[in-house]
Amino acid sequence: MSDEARELLERVREEVRRDGGTNELAPLIAGGRASLDALRGLAAEEHLIVRSDWRAFLTLAAQATERPQREFFAMVAGGEGLALAKLGDFAAACGLTGADLASYRPLPGCQAYPSYVARLALDGNPHDALLAILANFAEWGGYCATIAGGLREHYGFDDAACAFFDFFATPSPELDALSLAALDAVLATGWTPEGALPAARLLHSYELMFWNTLAGVA
């Protein structure tokens, strides 16, 4: 594995961070200041997002031209399937039933993120999608760790209720290695990352929009 992939990923992550913006909901949960309505919204919105991302990642796996890239998207898709099962316990802890989730009216500011992931999949450029998605993965894991801690400390949620966030907060050396191998393989094709930078920035903005829309409910 070359250093080129690692250096590229860190450079793009730094460029995305320089665009600014903060997640306003995670600190509210960490401090016990988010309302139960905001937590319910988080559960219901994620219920829609995980299912959408699962399909998008499978689509990207089917489009991938390089074996490590295909394996990465397939592994991430499998993780979404595992996460969906854990999400039900969080929703139940928030007081939501299956009927509540089915009748929930999603917020546009929350659904912009999965809509853009789906667009990346439909655009048919899995190389650009790979870098854009990888550039935003690290922050998502950190948010989940913060939320899991806040849910336990201030809301009395047990391990089952926090399992969805624990799952994404737990480091995965295997996934990290596969992500770099995938990026390495894509770079070896002669692909250049310039076209992926706008996608990475947009995805980051849409993720912050997700969190901050829910912060408005808090």
Image: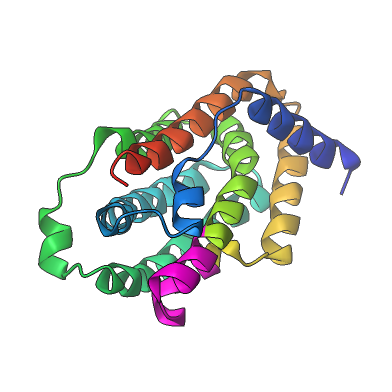
Residue at 70 percent across and 34 percent down: it is 13
- Can you see residue 2? yes
Residue 158: x and y in percent read 42, 81
Residue at 59 percent across and 30 percent down: it is 128
Majority SS type along the magenta span: helix
Residue 78: x and y in percent read 48, 64
Classify residue 129 by image quadrant.
top right
Query: Is residue 68 found left or right of 158 in the rendered image?
Result: right
Looking at the image, which is closer to me, 67 or 79?
A: 79
Q: Is residue 82 above or below residue 7?
A: below
Residue at 59 percent across and 63 percent down: it is 169
Q: Is residue 178 above or below residue 85?
A: above
What is the number of callouts on the image?
0
Query: Is residue 186 found left or right of 65 in the rendered image?
Result: right
Residue 51: x and y in percent read 33, 55
Classify residue 94 by image quadrant.
bottom left
Residue at 61 percent across and 46 percent down: it is 139
- Can you see residue 188? no
Looking at the image, which is closer to me, 211 or 164?
A: 211
Region in magenta = 147-166
Q: Is residue 148 magenta?
A: yes
Q: Is residue 156 magenta?
A: yes
Identify the residue at the far right of this view.
3
Residue 167: x and y in percent read 53, 68
Q: How is the image coloured?
A: rainbow
Looking at the image, which is closer to me, 24 or 160?
A: 24
